[in-house]
Amino acid sequence: MAIHHKGIIIHHDRLSREALQGLIEEFVTRDGTDTGYSDGSLVESVEMVIRQLNIGEVFIVYDEATQTANIVPKEYTKSISQEEV
């Protein structure tokens, strides 16, 4: 998984409920990648990601170069700047 150094970590509480739900649903149903969330139902997978966001195991990263958001494990975020708002 490639992470651009210009990415910005966005705290999940900064997103509306609808935006967060849409981002997580897109992530757990993404074709062509092994996100590890395909074993359960959509509801179970979304709940798992929300739990991981709440405890800091994964983060939302916005990539300015591609103008996309992704959910990444904590270890991939060490060189990414935190959102400053």
Image (cartoon, grey):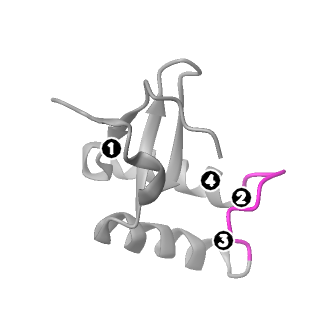
The numbered mark, 4 or 1, whose residue comes first in the sequence reads 1
Q: Main secondary structure of the magenta part?
A: loop
| Residue with the mark numbered 2 | 29
State if disc 3 and disc 4 touch (CB < 8 Å). yes
**Residue located farthest toward the top when viewing the structure as drawn:** 65
| Residue with the mark numbered 3 | 37
The numbered mark, 2 or 3, whose residue comes first in the sequence reads 2
Residue extent of the magenta highlight: 29-38
State if disc 3 and disc 2 touch (CB < 8 Å). no
How far apart are labels 3 and 1 at the CA level?
Answer: 21 Å
Q: Amino acid at mark 4?
A: Phe
Q: Amino acid at mark 1?
A: Leu
**Quarter placement of the C terminus:** top left
| Residue with the mark numbered 4 | 27
Residue drawn where x is 51% and y is 53% of the image: 72
| Residue with the mark numbered 1 | 15
How far apart are labels 4 and 3 at the CA level?
Answer: 9 Å
The numbered mark, 1 or 2, whose residue comes first in the sequence reads 1
State if disc 2 and disc 4 touch (CB < 8 Å). yes
Say left or right for 36 vs 49: right
Splitting the image into 4 quarters, where does residue 42 fall? bottom right
Mark 3 crowd level (few <14, some 14–19, many ≥20, 10 Å Cα): some
Picture coordinates of residue 77 (x, y %)?
A: 41, 47
